[in-house]
Amino acid sequence: MKTILYILICLSTTSSVFSQQYYVRGEVKDESGNPLQNATILNARTGYVYKTGTTGSFGIINTQRIDTFTVSLDGYISERLIANADNFATVKLKLSPAGSSTTRLNKLSSFTSGMARDEQRKWFAGDETYASIIENHFVNAKRFPNTGLSLNVDRASYSNIRRFVTLNTMVPPDAVRIEEMLNYFNLNYTKPAGNDPFAVRTRLTSCPWNPLNQLFYINLSAKKLNLVTLPPSNLVFLIDVSGSMDMTNRLPLLKSAFKMLVSNLRPKDSVAIVVYGGITGIMLNTTSGGEKEKILKTIDELTPGGATPGESGIKLAYSVARNHFIKGGNNRVILATDGDFNVGLRTDDELNELISRHRESGIYLTCLGVGMGNYKDSKIQTLARKGNGNFAYLDNFDEAQKVLMKEFAQTLYAVADDAYMNVEFNPEYVKEYRLIGFDNKVGAIVDSLAMVEGGEIGSGYAMIGIFEIEPAQTNLKMDSALSLPGKFADIKLKYRNPKDTTMRYFNYSCTYQFEPFARIENHYRFSAAVTMFGSLLRGSAYAKSINWNDLALLAGASANLEDLSQKEFVTIVNQARELYTKTKKKKKPKEP
């Protein structure tokens, strides 16, 4: 049955009642005839906005038989439509040229309305590239009580940091994204109540690196999908087999990773394998997940060589996914690469535009980064975020097992799309606040067209977001529990269910409930340790009072040593302490 978006509008701006209504129907496609989901349809007369459904179709109840609409979609040239309710309308959108003003190339990770934009210098790390980001500053709560942040399950930053520290190498500051470090540990998962999609818990406590300030934690958990009843998957493995992948920690690691993923597939799932390198082609046509031997044999036969024609590989993979699209299923391209695109599109903006054309088709993109030396973090991050998907970095076999086995459902199955959180603080209790992590790229922060774009939330996902708070009431005691009347903050989640165009909302309010840092649960204390670690690695202006010894003590005291990831974190912190302390001593000038 063809899916059509029905939008009913009650017009109450005047006292008159319209005696007749018309139904305007149609569809929006690209030049190749592919349906375009989530295209925006603006009624020029009323100002009302509509969206196309998963098949690119729309149905609008209107008061005029003939009316004028503007149809638009990021990456395409807008079209004017004069629609007649007696006829079925077909709109074809043409791709906009790169750099066109109709395409929003930059997306923000967080945004506070009314705040001025600023700039920051860029960082370089040899042949590796990282998007230069600007750390969020303190914001006056009275002037700007609302702030928003994009939610996603990306966690690549932590495993990449681990790779640098393990190799006894300084971490490039822009490789440090604190929200991804916190995501990595999936801390304090709480099952949502009843049919709720989310569970929210908050905690207000003292700040361990600034005793005059407080930390406000937001712990969000998403519902877990039933693995037995998950819809069928249409997966396309897009694997970089270029010459740069000819190292143990690249193609061989990826082959092991994909083999693990295949073991989770069911007969109703399907897999195709597309490669790009010396050649770009389909190594395995779409095959049932029940034919594991056939899939594994194809993976074993992959060999590296040649250039890196990333553009042609991406286009071919999306074409395969689109040709075998499963309505109501999990349609996803899984790109595995070191990101070293040297043939075709190369820049972040060019890749951004390419992926933007495909994201509305209902096909997700998961990116797996590998390698070192020429690893292009900025490019892979761009692809994942623009492709309505997620991003992980595989630095070793254990990480591959964690991402594709232990966290299989969280990585590959979304429970919410375009997820965005808005937080509104009460100025009676909050003088200033600073969002930790969710820092924006320089390119986005200086772009007047940039906007916050929600992310993908996976099954069983848990995140902890942290704000540093300067209290409005400085006479409050920070050494004992304290409850005060009135609202402290309102939290509003905006999201869509997968394959649905309707925006949904989940609200949560909390009062002022303060608990001293020494008495809060260990997972919150551990989160503070992760935050301090990231702040030191970034050389944050707000980390001047943090020292490595205090961090190591807090990490050791708060980590759950039965959790291998948290236990390993303590080891990584101690390795980094030795590395950075030693480096600082070498740089210390000699006294005359």
Image (tube, rainbow, N blue to C red):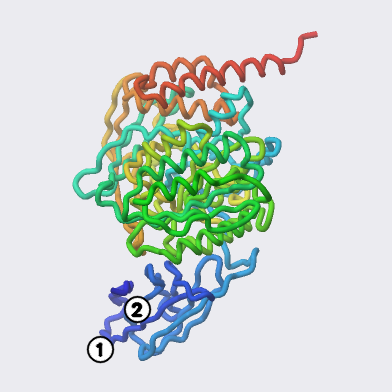
Separation of marks 2 and 1 at Cα, in angstroms: 17 Å
Q: Is residue 265 visible?
A: yes
How many numbered discs sit on the rendered protein? Answer: 2
The three-letter amino acid code for the residue at tag 2 is Ile
Look at the numbered disc 2 and give the secondary structure of its residue. strand
- Residue drawn where x is 56% and y is 26% of the image: 536
Name the foreground residue: 344 vs 579: 344
x and y percentages locating residue 317 in the rendered image: 52, 58
Q: Residue at the spot x=29%, y=31% of the render? A: 513
Question: Percent x, y for residue 19?
Answer: 25, 88
User: Is residue 474 left or right of 114 when viewed as pictured?
Assistant: left
Q: Quadrant of the N terminus?
A: bottom left
Mark 1 lies on residue: 19
Q: Left or right of 382: which side holds 53? A: left
Q: Which mark is residue 60?
A: 2
The three-letter code of the residue at mark 1 reads Ser
Q: Relative to 454, say whether 545 is above or below.
A: above
Q: Which quadrant: the C terminus?
A: top right
In the rendered view, tell whether residue 369 sits above or below residue 8: above
